[in-house]
Image (cartoon, rainbow, N blue to C red):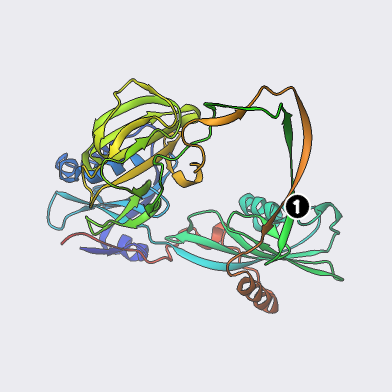
Amino acid sequence: MRIVLWVLVFITWSFGMQVHYLQWKKGMTFSDYMQERNIPVSLLHSISKEDQKFLLEIRNDYRYYELVDEDGTLEQSLIPISKEMQLHIFRKKGSHDYGFDIIPIHYSNKAYFGKLTIVSNPYSDAVDTTGYPLVAKRLSMALKGVVDTGKLHQGDEIDFLYTQRTRLGVPYTPPLIKVIRLDSGKHEKFIYVDEDGYGYDELGKQVAYTVTGKKKVVYTRRVKGHKKGSRFGMPLRHIRITSSFSYRRWHPILHRYRPHHGTDFGARRGTPLLAVNDGKVVYAGWMHGYGRVVKIKHAGGYVSLYAHQSRIRVKRGQYVRKGQIIGYVGSSGRSTGPHLHFGLMKNGRWIDPMKVLRKKSVGGTFVLKKFTKYETVKTTKYRKVEIKGAEENKKRLEAYLIDNAPSYIWKKERFEGRLKDEEVLEDDE
């Protein structure tokens, strides 16, 4: 069975089918969803233990698609579990049974040209021009620290190039501004925007920036001790990363795309595993494809996971210190060889561990003696501005300026009722 959702009108007229765009109900489980849609429980039994863990990744704020027939029977469902992957539920041809798979999300990513004239300020004028506060927020963020917007005059022009992901014709993620041009009539200035949304008026140069903070004045003597706090150490003393965190990775055993919610560290069997921070062991035992697993709850909403262990050294309910040995490297569960799969959650959501872990914070540390007073200090640091594709984006913006025809993808009337992005869904038959 092959259904092309972008021909919605044809499907609706010819077969009486409809596409619904819904939001996942708060507190609803995948089992609840199956019961509401009259999906046989045999579908849940057919899902492998390895894939069942991804059913827990559905968030209340996720929106999903359903294709239903004229009787209201579910034919297909696409339910996101991350920015890149989604659950695919489909009714098998000529049967009341359903199939299940995890597939990449198909979306379109295009570049567009925005243009506005200053009347009040960039944020308000962007909202008035585009009708979309989020793009105004992104524009203001890129200008902050680079342009004194209070000195802009009425009639000054702001042009910008941005990209927009759309899924079935509807904006899928916030727009990403790539480059901005300011034109006051007398002067022209280009601002290049990095992937985090911050703007720079220089490229390839060392740019100075100032960090202001409180400095603690202490005695020069230092003593060895354990420093508590939010700094996370590494789970191994010697680090060798073999696979990084990814929302969409080709699985070496299943030979399919699957999310990889963690970092894999290569190490010999029996290598000690270290707690990355103080915490309480909330799980210690066997966990499906992860094999022998230890989970530790830390302050600040963090939970760390250590999988594929050969031997576990801690028990559930036990409190551990940062740097304490909690187990040993192995290849239990679904594994191609000895390694540590390390996962880290923040408030119930998987995050990239390497953005939190610190290489020099394992075990005991040297701490300064008690602080006696505080001083406000300013430190000058330097960073090299390198933005991939910056010059190409500038040329594209200049080309749009020749045509001088803005295209606002966020305008509601541009996508309401249209499914422009082709998305072909297939089952196993």
- Judge by depth and name the residue closer to the eye, 411 or 24: 24
Query: Could you tell me residue 416's position as x and y percent?
Result: 49, 58
Using the image, determine if residue 166 lies above or below residue 245.
below
Q: How many marks?
A: 1
Residue under label 1 = 145
Instruction: Please give the name of the residue rendered at 66% of the width and 61% of the height, measured from the top-left corner.
Output: 384
Q: Is residue 51 visible?
A: yes
Instruction: Please give the name of the residue rendered at 71% of the width and 27% of the height, measured from the top-left corner.
Output: 218
Locate residue 331 relative to residue 244 in the image: left or right. left
**Picture quarter with the C terminus:** bottom left
| Quadrant position of residue 286 | top left
Q: Secondary structure at mark 1?
A: loop
Locate residue 275 relative to residue 115 in the image: left or right. left
- Judge by depth and name the residue closer to the eye, 345 or 114: 345
**Picture quarter with the N terminus:** bottom left
The amino acid marked with disc number 1 is: Gly
Report crowding for label 1: few under 14, some 14 to 19, many 20 or more residues within 10 A (C-alpha). Answer: few
- Judge by depth and name the residue closer to the eye, 300 or 18: 300
Q: Is residue 58 visible?
A: no
